[in-house]
Amino acid sequence: MKISTKGRYGLRAMVDLAVNSAVDHVALKSIAERQGISENYLEQVFSSLRKASLINSIKGAQGGYVLAKSAAGITVGDILRVLEGDLSVIDDKTAAGEQSNKTEACIKGAVWDSINASINEVVDGITLEKLVEDYKKMTKSEYHMFYI
């Protein structure tokens, strides 16, 4: 499994949105500038996230985006599944077609299903809130570094 640019940029943009929308909605342009991502590309990403009810848009000249629910209620898995689809290491159709082969069926149960379960456990165990906390710790420590 490989995470595409859409998934990586979408996750970055969601962390940025969570960090910066604590007080007010955030313009897509400002996220694009901070993250170095094309505004047009982010529009496509945010369209998918909005349709999945992870974010809400506010229309108008002073419009922007906000999280649709708390950062604690959104996981990395939620975001990646919207942007990437299924996070399995092999295609379910491929696995189903090979099930008649007993060796492949054994491998599927012992290897592919275990890897998929591990991936899902990791991405579903990390919330947007955790990423925001980590980001704030990193940026806070950058400002308090003293060199001699």
Image (tube, rainbow, N blue to C red):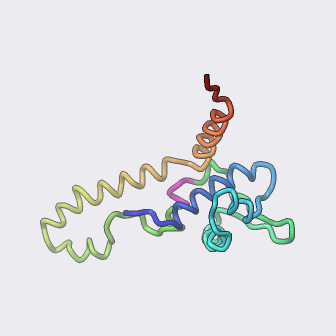
Q: Position of residue 36 (x, y in %)?
A: 63, 61
Which quarter of the rendering shows the N terminus? bottom left
As displayed, is residue 13 above or below residue 93? above
Q: Is residue 21 left or right of residue 52?
A: right
Quarter of the image for residue 92 reads: bottom left
Q: Position of residue 141 (x, y in %)?
A: 63, 33
Quarter of the image for residue 135 reads: top right
* Main secondary-structure element of the magenta-colored stretch: helix
| Residue 139 colored in magenta in the image | no
Using the image as rendered, state which of residue 97 and residue 6 is in the foreground.
6
Using the image as rendered, state which of residue 8 and residue 77 is in the foreground.
8
Instruction: Name the residue rendered at 51%, 66% in the picture.
Output: 5
Q: Is residue 116 left or right of residue 130?
A: left
**Farthest residue in the right direction?**
61
**Farthest residue in the front direction?**
148
Q: Is residue 71 left or right of residue 123?
A: right
Q: Position of residue 85 (x, y in %)?
A: 47, 69
Quarter of the image for residue 107 reads: bottom left
Instruction: Name the residue rendered at 48%, 52% in the picture.
Output: 124
Instruction: Name the residue rendered at 61%, 38% in the picture.
Output: 138
Using the image as rendered, state which of residue 104 and residue 29 is in the foreground.
29
As displayed, is residue 83 above or below residue 78? below
Using the image as rendered, state which of residue 39 and residue 14 is in the foreground.
39
Q: Position of residue 16 (x, y in %)?
A: 66, 54
Which quarter of the rendering shows the C terminus? top right
The number of discs equals 0
| Magenta extent | 75-79
Instruction: Name the residue rendered at 68%, 69% in the picture.
Output: 39
**Farthest residue in the top direction?**
148
